[in-house]
Amino acid sequence: MNYDVIVVGGGHAGVEAALSSARMGNKTLMISMLAENIGATSCNPAIGGLAKGHLVREIDALGGEMGLLTDEAGIQFRILNQTKGPAVRGSRAQIDMDRYRIVARNRLLSTKNLDLTQEMAESLVVKNGEIKGVKTDLLNEYSASKVIITSGTFLNGIIHIGEVQQVGGRFGEQTSINLSKSLKDDCNLSIARLKTGTCARIDSSTIDFSVMEEQGGDELPNPFSFRTDREEFRATKKQLPCFIAYTNKTTHDIIEGNFYRAPLFTGQIAGKSPRYCPSIEDKISKFADKDRHHLFIEPQTVDNTECYINGLSTSLPPDVQRDMIHSVEGMENAKIVRYGYAIEYDFVDPRELKHSLETKKIKGLYLAGQINGTTGYEEAAAQGIMAGINASLSLQNKEPLILRRDEAYIGVLIDDLVTKGTNEPYRMFTSRAEYRLLLREESADTRLAHYGHQLGLVDDELYEKVKKKDKEIKEGAKLLEDIKFTPNKEFNAFLESMDEQPLKDVSTAQQLVARKSFDVDKMIKLVPQLDKYNNYIKDEILVEGKYARYIDKQTQEIARMKKYLKVSIPDGFEFKKVSGLSNEIVEKLEQFNPPTLQAAMNISGITPAAIEILHIYIRMASKKMVHKPF
């Protein structure tokens, strides 16, 4: 009954937390309500997407499991934003939901140092501000000096389907009431409510796919994990198509005509909804001028017996759900297997946390996933692995691993949460990362694998491959930087043959590849020495060349901004006396009272210009203090 680390919850955060803790040598226990649903994808049958794919790659680079699970259970793989720059492209995979959770559960059960028990955590044992263990509904008490709560939507969960309300953390499953009470009463943590939802599931045999647009996977699919053999994956992975349908005026009329029965509008639901993944009734209300909305018909398993209707999340009554689904072309005879629903649940204000994800008030207590106000499997898993790592490092009396905003999307995610908090389900976007040119998906391993290796989560063989990849990309990028061409008739003719404008001045090869129409074949013609590398490395060298000047600028900006880390804001500093700051910015600075300029920069709404002004005033105040006579 004695453990080093206890993980409460078996969702995506719990899986990564438990595995990282056990693999770092700690005796670890996972407490889960239902062992069969460990790793369950409660909503959509997909992993990744824009910015979310970056998170999965970073989890993988640190030695996490989500990428490997996705490669094994995936049934369609696509790169989103293919026509845009590499920094904002995102990998996404449809998965076999059944296969994913089975593989996840079996991975846990076969992991050394990791035990699993099917119980409900009822309360936390806290003494003198330190966590001591967990009590369960079976009257068992487990002791540990580190506890990680990954409770998802199960804290005080209430399900809404029209006028019907049911207590539950997921449809058909129990809710956790006492644990939420313990977090509030025993730990004195600030608790609030959020709302999320899901769509109806349809019997695939009752859908007419012939009138819909087919959407297949990439012809050459890319795996999520850096540990998956790319060529073997491409040769053997079987993919299923998705389909695109559309709502129409009839659909919208049905929904709008039943607004008075929508829990979202009647006051039945009080929790804040996800802004970037709204229910269909919310979309119809906010975008009344739109004639139609996309619906993505996605298979839930390789057998394709049920389909997920992405874009049709709802908590409308069952009869309304039937009518609106039957109004969509191709789904006139669709049979609903499971109705859509909304769920409200408790979450903890993430400003209660340190960057390590340990709570500020209770030593040894960590929170990860939706309990911190996030939405999405990927955001949860990212927090889970970091909580598991930092709980383990604390047991070793080592400093926590805090990823910076310029080295990982995980760093952006956690920093946003613990410094700014959130009043709506937080979702990761590439636009949230100031240094996204440095944080491309394909560079996740070269950015983060050294941490995973130091922690013992990335083995020597894999780390050597990462170092080899990094070395080759840097060698190729240096060749592009070093090789120069003197414009002459022969060279200008060569450029014109590639539909490029001749250059008037001497230019580096690196500047040439920055042109939009430049590809790998042209790069090899200019620098034949690069032909010795494999195609994957060539692609990455080309990307490095295209982004080189912009990366240099961002690197310089990072160096300048890092200086702010050393600039403290004096105690009692009066922000309202700083000329040039808006009332809104002054109000936020007074509210948060940041100790440093770095902390001030992390407050939502504080602009770089405001930081510059503050820096000047702090320097002025410092000089006055130095010259102040006794």
Image (tube, rainbow, N blue to C red):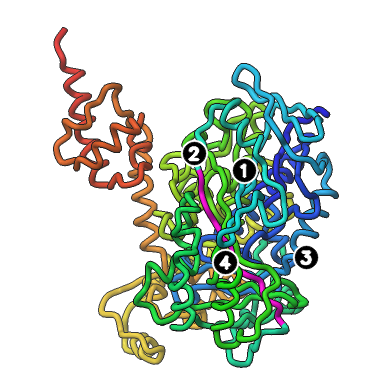
Q: Are marks 3 and 2 in contact (CB under 8 Å)?
A: no
Instruction: Single out the mark in the foreground, 4 or 1.
Output: 4
First in sequence: mark 1 vs mark 3:
3
Q: Which residues are magenta?
A: 193-204
Location of mark 4 (residue): 317
First in sequence: mark 4 vs mark 2:
4
Q: Which percent across, then down, holds residue 113?
A: 82, 39
Q: Are marks 1 and 3 in contact (CB under 8 Å)?
A: no
Which numbered circle lies on residue 99?
A: 3
Instruction: Single out the mark in the foreground, 1 or 3.
Output: 1
Instruction: Single out the mark in the foreground, 4 or 2.
Output: 4
- Residue in the picture at 46% in, 43% down: 415
Q: Residues within 10 Å of mark 4 (few under 14, many from 20)?
A: many
First in sequence: mark 4 vs mark 1:
1
Location of mark 1 (residue): 155
Find the distance from the CA under tag 4 to the CA under tag 1: 24 Å
Location of mark 2 (residue): 349
First in sequence: mark 4 vs mark 3:
3
